[in-house]
Image (spheres, rainbow, N blue to C red):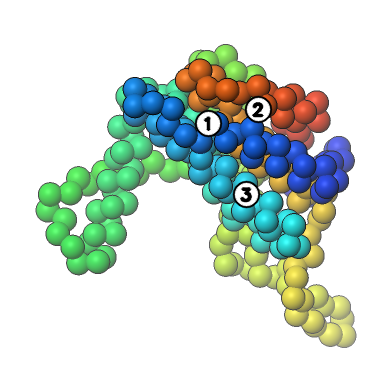
Amino acid sequence: MSANPYTPPPWDDLLSLANKAITASAPVAVLPNGNETANVTISLAAAARSRRLMMGLVTLVESDHDDVMGGMLRTLYETWLVGIYALLGGDEALQRLLAQRDKQQKMFAKVLGEPIDELSDGQNLGVEVLAGKVTTLLESDSHENAEFARAAYTFFYRFESYRSTHGGLGSIIGHIDEDENSRTILERRPEDDDGMRHRFLLGIALLVSSAQMPAIKSGLPHEGLDQVAKRILALNPSKQGK
């Protein structure tokens, strides 16, 4: 993940690009009228969530806390998957997403001691399975780089799970600096700056995609998103870091 065959833009340029994506996605993070299908509504809501996540990521970088942004990047990828699945997957996608919600709600109700007899058992929808479904839908919709959805589960989602989201040694051990004579606990875990900027750029691309696709489908303004997307494509990050 750290050995990228290109050099990502510097942080100042990335922050500028992220803020442009946040501004350009604002018209999409709304419900323009009451006639959208449930699928489109979920996709627009996912774009709104992605936008808020990117705002949080910008705040972390600007406050010198970019070493803890991995968990939010993982959530951004999951949110993107759900939004695209809802947008392109029709009624089957809607029912699978609702079944996953039902399963989680019944689990929480049981833990809290609430009545569960009338609650649906639901059905699990794992992230890896979801990523495969999104790749298939993107391929059917003739999108370039449709394989990204599935590939990113390994090189992006699982990496952030190991390195940043879960509290195992993959996340913790970076705070230990040792040599043959001593050990020191570090306040901030050292990071590969190129790798961090690369992952942040992927996060920007996820936000743009999560807003651009439902905007096009719904007739919402997307010119600003198109401009940011062209800038990202000029950097060709989709073929990097795998």
Give the Cα distance between marks 2 and 3: 16 Å
Say whether marks 2 and 1 touch (CB < 8 Å): yes
Horizontal and vertical percent position of residue 170:
65, 63
Instruction: Note whether residue 235 is visible.
Output: yes
> Which residue is labeled 3 in the image?
55
Out of 67 and 34, give the one closest to the viewer: 34
Instruction: Relative to 94, say whether 177 is above or below.
Output: below
What residue lies at 79% left-to-right and 65% top-to-bottom?
190
- SS class of the residue under badge 3? helix
CA distance separating discs 1 and 3: 15 Å
In primary-sequence order, the first of circles 1 and 3 is 1
Q: Secondary structure at mark 1?
A: helix
In the image, residue 105 above or below residue 95: below
- Point 58% across, 26% down: residue: 212
Please state the horizontal and vertical placement of residue 178, each as a whole percent of the image: 82, 77
On the picture, is 232 further left or further right than 53? right
Please state which amino acid type lies under the numbered disc 1. Val
The answer to whether residue 160 is seen in the rendering is: no
**The disc label shown at residue 225, or none:** 2
User: How many residues crowd around disc 3 within 10 Å: few (fewer than 14), some, or many (20 or more)?
Assistant: some
For label 2, count other residues whose C-alpha is less than 10 Å away and answer few (under 14), some (14-19) or many (20+).
many
The label shown at residue 28 is: 1
Q: CA distance from mark 2 to mark 1?
A: 10 Å
Query: Which comes before the other along the chain, label 2 or label 1?
Result: 1
Quadrant hosting residue 201? top right
In the displayed image of the protein, which residue is found farthest to the bottom? 181
Secondary structure category for the residue under label 2: helix
The residue type indicated by label 3 comes to: Met
Q: Quadrant of residue 5?
A: top right
